[in-house]
Image (cartoon, coloured by chain):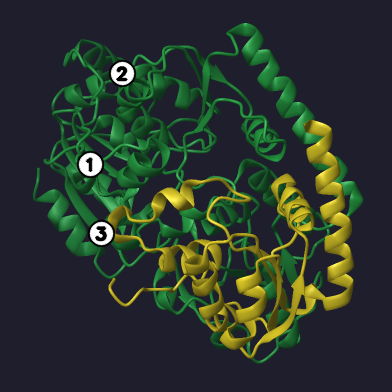
Amino acid sequence: MILERLFSALSGRRLWLKLKRKYDFDSGVFALLMPEDDIKLNFLALKHIKDLLEYRRASGVVILSANEWVLANAIRHSGQIIDIVQLSEKSIENIISYAEFYFFSQWLITVSLDRPYGVKARQAIGVSGITLEDMVCLGIYCIRNWTSMEA
Amino acid sequence: MDNYELAKIKKRINSLIRRKLLSGKRIILFGASAASKEVKRILLDNGLRPDAVIDNDKRKLGKYCFGLTVQTPEAVIEPFDDSTSILIYSASYYKEITLQLNKMGYETDKHVFCLNLKGDERASLFLYTLGRMSRGWLAYLRLTLKYSRNHVLFLAPYAGTGDIYLSGLFLEQYLKSKNIKEYIFVVVSGACRKTSEIFGIENIEVLSSTIVDDIINCNRAFSLGWRIVILNDGWMNERTQWIRGYKGLSFDRMFRYFVFELDESVSYQLPLYLNSQREGLILLEKYRLLPGRTVVLSPYSNTLLELPDDFWKRTAERLKGLGYSVCTNSSGANEPAIEDTTLVYFPLGQAVDFMNAAGFFIGVRSGLCDIISASSCKKIVLYEKDGVFFRGSPFEYFSLKKIGLCIDALELEYSRDTESACLEMMLGLF
């Protein structure tokens, strides 16, 4: 198990470096890793790309996903998507394993409530009126001035 | 800010000072947050004073951040000024900020210095992280050898005693709800140990703060499934940190929901005090302070604003004029006495006794306020007016009354503008 996780993280690092070379993430481009099959979560993440880029002063995003809905629908949601990259489930798992090792790049955003930082974000939904949209914008995208309409 | 980050910031600032990159420069802090306080404190310890705090977050503009008004980058560092050194501390945004400053003409490592642990993809950093995890693994093994693998490991990674106090309030209920019989309670300082002991917590271990982080990292990275509970509401990039203060999520509610998974119906388990003054009276006598007419000033806090020295000095002078003896609570050499007051140290386990005997407390909001909230003394607690703590203000987030720890404290929001009014309201209690 331990070796498996280690090799997975190493593979994730290799793949990340390859993607970084291709898309030059350090120049202000976010990699949006979308590993979940949760349509609502993915929809909200796509819906708020513009807010993410505006607040964090970035120029575009590259979508990384294996999810068919995301691959088919992403482009409709934002003109600032530079590319949509179809990855295998295994490749996605490898990148997440790498992210679970340490915070290697702020240009990687994982659209998930459980990984790589634990499950508390999922527990937060519904508490004190916290919505999934709040967690996407505040928790995942770190848009610090985000306020939902009903807040 | 995790413990490695703090160590890194200190090292980085010391290195900048040694290389003379900060002396004689206009020092600007980029990012108004709780972390700015650590940065400012380290600078002050080295005889340097930041000139301004800037931030891109519009909510923070015009507010005070540890004595400085938060301004936009454009207002402070445009046009380009070669004598400016900009220190960035922002765990999530530093690369974006660096790009922004570069576009304004400021060069990285000449004008712009990032204080963060800069995560990147170097193989050496990967290996370093692995090394740290091995250390975490060994520490975990040592603990389980001393106790057992069946013990649940509670890890309190932050040195603030307020976190420990809050954890103590919920721990008993949590143990019951999860049917936990055996546990180890790991803290990172002697003060945290003392706070834990107030609640009768067992099997307390004090570990270095970085080792606690290593244990957490190791468990996460290798999905080891160790039975660990992290006693913090948003440690190490946990996404819940960003909702602190949002939609009424105060300090206690964050711990209640996201650390202990308890609903509002579960009440606190307050520590049992004998409500005696005996130990306190002995301490007062030792320091030659007047029983029932002593004001304990507590100007130091781990997390929140500390008020200007002259405010405390004025307060002490006025109180002495009214016939009170005035002392400053200190936990060490870096917490000196307010001028013309007696420096006192009381063990946290005796804090309530001491305060009962002394009679009066005036302090900035700190973990000590949680502990002495059970005292019958008159309490005045100060918060930074217009301050920002994640999505709330320090008062909204940490208010003792809102948390439900006491109803008799006078809680005031301090700013330079309200200083005189604050002082008069405080003195009205005497």
Disc 3 residue type (three-letter):
Glu
Q: CA distance from mark 3 to mark 1?
A: 27 Å
Nearer the observer: mark 1 or 2; the answer is 1
- Tell me where residue B354 sits by quadrant: top left
Query: Depth check: A68 or B377 in front?
Result: A68
Which numbered dot is residue B413? Answer: 3
Mark 3–mark 2 distance (CA, rounded to whole Å)? 28 Å
Q: Earlier in the sequence, mark 3 or mark 2?
A: 2
Residue A48 in sight in this render: no
Which badge, 1 or 2, is on the more N-terminal residue?
1
Q: Residues at badges 3 and 2 in contact (C-beta under 8 Å)? A: no
Give the chain letter for green.
B
Classify mark 1: helix, strand or loop.
loop
3 or 1: tag closer to the N-terminus? 1
Q: Which dot marks residue B350?
A: 2
The three-letter amino acid code for the residue at tag 2 is Gln
Residue ID at (60%, 51%): A115
Chain that bears disc 3: B
Q: Chain of mark 1?
A: B
Q: Are marks 3 and 1 on the same chain?
A: yes
Q: What is the x, y in percent for residue A113? A: 53, 55
Q: Label 2 lies in what chain?
A: B
